[in-house]
Image: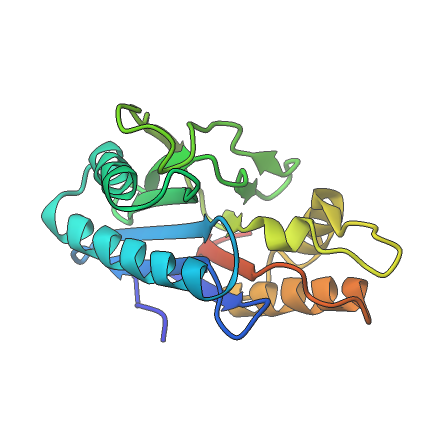
Amino acid sequence: SMPLLSGYDLAGTSSPARSVGGDFFDFVPIDGNHLCFWVGDVAGKGLPAALTMATIQATLRGDTAATHDVSRILHRANRYLCSNTTRSTFVTLFLGILDAATHEVSFGNAGHNRPLLLSSGEEPETLEYGDLVLGFAEDIEYSVKKVQLRPGDVLVVYSDGINEAMNVSREQFGEHRLIEILSAIRTESASNMVNAVVEQVQKHAGSAPQADDLTIAVIKRLGNN
């Protein structure tokens, strides 16, 4: 079940392309006002990716308990991967810490898809910022950016299995379809938004086999729309 955070509606899901997958997401309460969340994608599929995913999940949870510094959490996860995996193993990761008192999200992006921010009366915004993937080089410094969530704002973080899902004609689902769907249902619950996106991605793919894990997480600030 999703953690409860006053003033917010949270939802997420991950559907592996095989029996096990390399995508992962989590919502980790830090205290009454702070929530750490992330969506990540391990290069590769199947059991090797799943084992790396499980390890990095545990590493992130441990680091979140020890520090609330986004940059430090990413740095420690990157250093662990560089020291304990092969050169070809890397992970994309978006990680944020939400302060429910100030409604500010501090975030870092290690090569992951750019999240979407949907606000009432405005065009959807892509958080156009990112550093290199985890596991590429041990000395990478990860920067931290901040974004404010207003009442009714929706932050959507997803893996490339969503936008790159293909049908039998090898046509990708695309970010434009994702934005259209999310914009049309922005006022609905976080779980309804998650379910609608997954349903439309699967409908688009049709009879084409699922080629990649599908992961999406939604953070919605409650209030006037």
Q: What residue is drawn where x is 56% and y is 42%? A: 116
Q: What residue is drawn where x is 36% and y is 62%? A: 51
Q: What residue is drawn where x is 20% and y is 37%? A: 69
Write down the quadrant of residue 196 in the picture: bottom right
Marker count (numbered): 0
Write down the quadrant of residue 145 in the picture: top left
Foreground pick, 213 / 116:
213
Relative to 209, 142 lies left or right: left
Relative to 62, 13 lies left or right: right
| Residue 7 seen in render | no
Please, which residue is most extreme toward the front here? 86
Relative to 196, 4 lies left or right: left
Q: Is residue 157 above or below residue 190?
A: above
Q: Position of residue 211 (x, y in %)?
A: 67, 60
Foreground pick, 170 / 142:
170
Q: Position of residue 218 (x, y in %)?
A: 49, 57
Q: Position of residue 122 (x, y in %)?
A: 63, 36
Foreground pick, 201 / 4:
201
Relative to 67, 199 lies left or right: right
Which color scheme is applied? rainbow
Foreground pick, 157 / 207:
207
Q: Position of residue 125 (x, y in %)?
A: 59, 35
Query: Which quarter of the rendered picture does the N terminus lie within?
Result: bottom left
Q: Is residue 119 above or below residue 12?
A: above
Q: What residue is drawn where x is 77% and y is 56%? A: 166
| Residue 150 seen in render | yes
